[in-house]
Structure formats: structure tokens, C-alpha cells
Amino acid sequence: MESSRQYLDPKVLDRLGRLELRARRSVEGFLSGLHKSPHRGASVEFAEHREYVPGDDLRHLDWRIFGRSDRFYIKRYEEETNLRLTVVLDTSESMAYAGEGRPSKFRYGATIAATLAYLVLRHRDAASLALIDEKLETFVPHATRPAHLVTIADALEKAVVTRKTNPELVLRELATKLPPRGVVAIVSDLFAPQERVLAGVRALRSRGQDVIVFHVLDRDEVEFPFDRMTKFEGLEQLDPLTIDPKAIRKAYLDVFRDWQTALKKAFVGNGVDYRVVLTDTPLDVVLTTFLALRQKHGARR
């Protein structure tokens, strides 16, 4: 349980309150009592049991389990439409960067991953985790049990942030593993060729996934505040460079802003919910704003 506490801030969870992750399209359902299937009828294929909560359809109570345990459980079927969230966290070497006094992009991203998983599991929906770099390093399948949060947190604790990234290959592979019409939250600094990132995202979208991108950046990368001769260590197997940052600041910022603008335009054009997140922004501010907008959008459907 200790590993889950590392990435879950009780203050953040308290401030999130009743906000819920909503899907903008007809995915595999919504949260907390809003499980209305886009399909007609119910599947006869049994999937799992879950504990009864007030408001559940009493027709699906398993009386055999009640007779043995004196507790109420509901039979859940394949087409009973719980939301399925998959958090995809980039563990490539560039995510290890941390500006002075700030968490690394990986640590901040891992906290986003754990918190989203907590929110989904709290509402008895399914959460999954994929850790990616140049391959799919770790895949934790979907589950709805509250204890599943510990499994996800343990995977985050064991992650190694040392390799390059290959988003097209990995996201294409992941798309084949996921049930269709789920929610996929990608947490990454997106330091890879834009066309490869977009190809991977399109593979997910082609499977009906509602894709959210949390573009995690350090303020150093956005503002380039360096003012003296500096040696920049290469990440993802790039050579180090010693340069005068004042001589290249304007060119760097122009290129960076053009890159970010092009990414946003491409994501929006492909139906992706794109959010820039700086690692010095309190996580409760980031997620409260994001979830409130998702909730508002869902209410208009």
C-alpha cells in the first residue's frame, strides 16, 4: 500500500470532490449510476461479480452468493457498460527531467495516472495502465476491484525511465489489446516525431477510443530561462551540448511554440482532448479544471 500513497495526495483527492471523468462520445459508459448501454438488450456472457450498491437492478442479484456469504453481489455482463479507462504513461528518458525544486515529468505524470485510476475505481469502473517507451514495457489489464489501485501503483513504482520512445509502434500495439470504445489518457512530454505520435493516436481513435492527451512539460522547456554558458545533457541517447543559451533563446522559443501549436492543431483535428500541463502546477488545479470541463461537456450530450 505504501507505493500507492506515494502517488496519491489526499489533499488533491479531497479537492476533486464529486467531479467525475466523463466520456464525450458513446464509449463503454459513464460513471456512478449512469451505466446506460448504447446496445439494445443485455449480453448473456457473464463477466464478473461486484458488490451491490443502492440503485442497482435487483434482477441481477446473485442469490447463491447471498446464501453462502449473506452479502449482496450483482452479476455483471460483458455489455453492461462500465467505463474502461487506460492510462498510458511515457517512461522514456526525457521524462526524467526535473527543473530545480520541481518533480520530474515522470513523477508528475505517475501522480496523474494514479489519481485518474483512483477516481475511476472509486466509481466501480475499470482502470488499466500501460507504461511505454520504445516498446510496451508494462501492461496492467482492466479491473474494477478497489485493490487494483495497489497493482497500478506497484507498476508505477517499478518503472524504469532510461530508454528512447517509439509512440507509433507502441500505440498501434496497444490499440489491438484494448476493448473498443474506451477512454485512453496519454501522459507524455511527446518528445518524438509528430507524425509518429499522430499515427499512434489515430490507431487508437480507429478503435473508437476517446483519447485524452496530458502534455507534461517542465517550465524550463517552455520558457528556456537559462542565462549563462550551460552544458545540456542529451536525453534518449543524444550527445551533450555546451552552448550560450542567450544566443539561441529566441530561435528555441520560436521552434518550441510552433511545435506545440502544430501538435494542438493536429490533435484537435483528430478528435483528441489535448491539455498542456506544467509540473509546477498543483495537480488538483489541473485535474479539477479538466474534469469540470469534461463533466460540463458530458452534461450537454
Image (spheres, grey):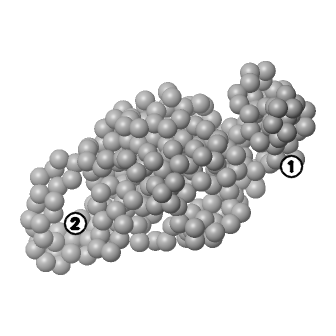
* Nearer to me, 271 or 14: 14
> Residue 212: x and y, percent?
53, 49
Most extreme residue toward the bottom is: 227
* Nearer to me, 270 or 182: 182
Which dot marks residue 54?
1
Identified at 41% across, 72% down, the residue is: 280
Q: Is residue 154 left or right of residue 184?
A: left
User: Along the polypeptide, which appears first: circle 1 or circle 2?
Assistant: 1
Quarter holding residue 232: bottom left
Please, what secondary structure does the residue beneath circle 1 have?
Answer: loop
Q: Is residue 233 above or below residue 179?
A: below
Q: Is residue 202 in view from this perspective?
A: no
Which dot marks residue 88?
none
- The residue labelled by disc 2 is 251
> Residue 204: x and y, percent?
51, 36
Identified at 54% across, 41% down, the residue is: 128
Total count of labels:
2
* Nearer to me, 113 or 25: 113
Q: Is residue 25 left or right of residue 152?
A: right
Q: Is residue 30 in view from this perspective?
A: yes
Label 2: how many Cα within 10 Å (few below 14, some 14–19, many 20+): few
> Residue 214: x and y, percent?
47, 55
The residue type indicated by label 2 comes to: Ala
Label 1: how many Cα within 10 Å (few below 14, some 14–19, many 20+): few
Identified at 36% across, 51% down, the residue is: 190
The residue type indicated by label 1 comes to: Pro
